[in-house]
């Protein structure tokens, strides 16, 4: 099967498990897969055969199977999405913490994005039949005594999605966002729930990261591996954003957000860096692209975009992007142009750009994603009322050369830089340092007074 990120396929699968591998407990062996539920399982001699429903369109790298004798705990979101956390029987007491976090974060994401997770892995343990509706609206079925009463309306029940989170004793990747079958290394999902801030905040961040991928990565997938920041940068941003919304924001910002930002600066200041939107020439470059540039810088650029636009306008742009490109592939330009489309009717957008004209996020965003590095902003006092602000590329180890394919970016290592002004704890608004100038002279009082 191709691992081209742009290839989307529908899969009809069958899994055969050799029961001799599982000893006397073979009748309890469970087969799971992502995005689609089991039609039936049957035991034939030493083999248990599980057949699964046809998947929706999905990227081939999201295919996953899981066969085990694990057990699970379960709970439901407010709209009835069933979550199960699977682990070894010995880890039963540690499942609750991750399960609660997953429920909270799924509810946050579905409300924030304005688009429910549309994975069609239907809950076959609870419903005997289903219909995939082309408009993705809920289907209704006869209510079962096995269902929680709050999911029943009269004698009908809304068919909802099912997500499995699996804690693996060992998993080199750490975690993977397979649609409806998210896998974690044990220590990244299971916790005793004791107040150990560094441990629990890290676990909750990773759960939020993987759940956000159900939209950024699964529902909307990057067109090629050179744009993987559209998956991981957004997940990095939202693992912080959701935590700030649902938990102790000050603690988490100190533990994660600032560290991530510092990592981005530290890794992007060398000539051996690369742009966020990269050119992939060899398979090895695919693996190399899962680095701090993709995760940390990608998240930082998205955070900067949200601050420029304002949180509500940013959210509006996100919702437009997800709805427009649902079950499709995108590249960086699609994201930036989608934001511009969402802002067309906004009055502030018309005169909020660096030159005083229309703020074109496509032009701004391309400067930060299509060339490596970042600017060092300098301030020099001219007199008691004026300061001079300048920029130059910040570079360590300048004896090295950039790769030829990145050596001469069209923006010549200049950026439109948003300057967020603050006096004490009071925010004073934003000013622009324009990329077309080496320096800008700014009056101190206008800068402070906005």
Image (cartoon, rainbow, N blue to C red):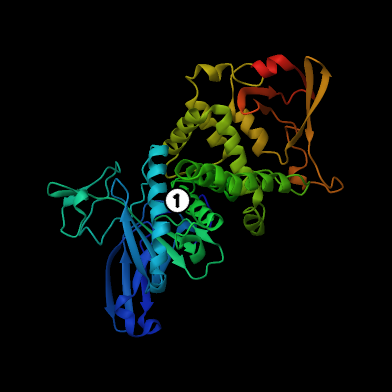
- The image quarter containing residue 43 is bottom left
Residue 331 location, x and y as percent?
56, 41
**On screen, residue 353 above or below 395:** above
Say whether residue 383 is visible: yes
Q: Where is residue 156 drawn, in percent x and y?
A: 15, 48
Local crowd size for mark 1, using a 10 Å CA cut-off: few (<14), some (14–19), many (≥20): many
Q: Nearer the viewer, residue 440 or 343?
A: 440
Q: Looking at this view, is 222 or 438 the one in front?
A: 438
Q: How many numbered marks appear?
A: 1
State left or right for residue 182 relative to residue 136: right
Tell me which residue sits at (37%, 45%) in the image. Answer: 107
- Residue sitting nearer the eye, 448 or 354: 448
Q: Residue at x 51, y 16 (%)?
A: 347
Residue placed furthest toward the right: 399
> In the orientation shown, which residue stands out farthest toward the left?
155
Q: Is residue 39 left or right of residue 11?
A: left
Towards the viewer: 171 or 108: 108
For the C terminus, the image quarter is top right
Secondary element under disc 1, as helix, strand or loop, is helix
**Spot occupied by residue 58 in the image (x, y as percentages of width and height):** 43, 52
Vertical arrangement, residue 107 with respect to residue 324, above or below? below
**Up-down relation of residue 336 to residue 285 (above or below):** above
Residue 226 visible? The answer is: no
Residue 353 pos. (x, y %): 62, 21
Apparent side of residue 218 relative to residue 234 in the rendered image (left or right): left
What residue sits right under mark 1 in the picture?
211
| Residue found at x 56% / y 62% | 173
Residue 409, quarter of the rendered image: top right
């Amino acid at each position: 099967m191709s691992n081209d990120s742009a290839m989307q396929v529908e899969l009809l699968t069958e899994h055969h498990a050799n029961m001799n591998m599982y000893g006397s407990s073979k009748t309890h062996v469970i087969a799971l897969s992502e995005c689609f539920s089991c039609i039936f399982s049957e035991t034939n001699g030493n083999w248990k055969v599980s057949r699964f429903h046809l998947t929706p369109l999905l990227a081939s790298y999201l295919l996953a199977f899981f066969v085990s004798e694990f057990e699970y705990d379960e709970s439901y979101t407010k709209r009835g999405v069933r979550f199960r956390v699977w682990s070894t029987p010995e880890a039963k007491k540690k499942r609750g913490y991750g399960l609660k976090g997953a429920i909270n974060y799924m509810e946050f994401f579905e409300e924030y994005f304005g688009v429910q997770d549309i994975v069609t892995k239907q809950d076959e343990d609870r419903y005997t039949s289903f219909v995939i509706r082309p408009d993705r609206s809920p289907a209704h079925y006869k209510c079962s005594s096995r269902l929680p009463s709050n999911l029943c309306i009269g004698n009908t029940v809304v068919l909802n999605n099912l997500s499995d989170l699996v804690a693996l004793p060992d998993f080199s990747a750490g975690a993977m966002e397979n649609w409806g079958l998210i896998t974690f290394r044990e220590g990244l999902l299971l916790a005793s729930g004791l107040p150990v801030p560094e441990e629990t905040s890290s676990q909750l961040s990773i759960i939020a990261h993987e759940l956000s991928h159900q939209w950024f990565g699964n529902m909307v997938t990057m067109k090629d591996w050179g744009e993987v920041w559209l998956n991981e940068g957004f997940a990095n941003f939202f693992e912080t954003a959701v935590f700030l919304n649902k938990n102790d924001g000050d603690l988490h910002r100190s533990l994660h957000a600032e560290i991530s930002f510092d990592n981005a600066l530290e890794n992007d200041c060398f000539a051996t860096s690369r742009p966020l939107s990269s050119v992939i020439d060899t398979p090895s470059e695919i693996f190399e692209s899962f680095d701090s540039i993709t995760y940390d810088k990608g998240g930082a650029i998205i955070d900067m975009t949200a601050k420029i636009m304002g949180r509500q306008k940013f959210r509006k742009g996100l919702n437009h992007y997800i709805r427009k490109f649902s079950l499709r592939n995108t590249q960086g330009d699609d994201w930036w142009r989608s934001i511009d489309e969402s802002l067309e009717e906004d009055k502030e957008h018309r005169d909020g750009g660096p030159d005083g004209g229309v703020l074109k996020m496509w032009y701004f965003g391309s400067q930060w994603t299509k060339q490596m590095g970042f600017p060092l902003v300098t301030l020099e006092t001219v007199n008691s009322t004026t300061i001079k602000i300048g920029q130059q590329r910040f570079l360590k180890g300048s004896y090295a050369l950039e790769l030829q394919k990145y050596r001469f970016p069209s923006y010549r290592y200049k950026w439109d830089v948003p300057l967020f002004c603050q006096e004490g704890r009071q925010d004073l608004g934003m000013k622009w340092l324009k990329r077309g100038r080496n320096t800008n002279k700014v009056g101190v009082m206008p800068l402070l007074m906005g």
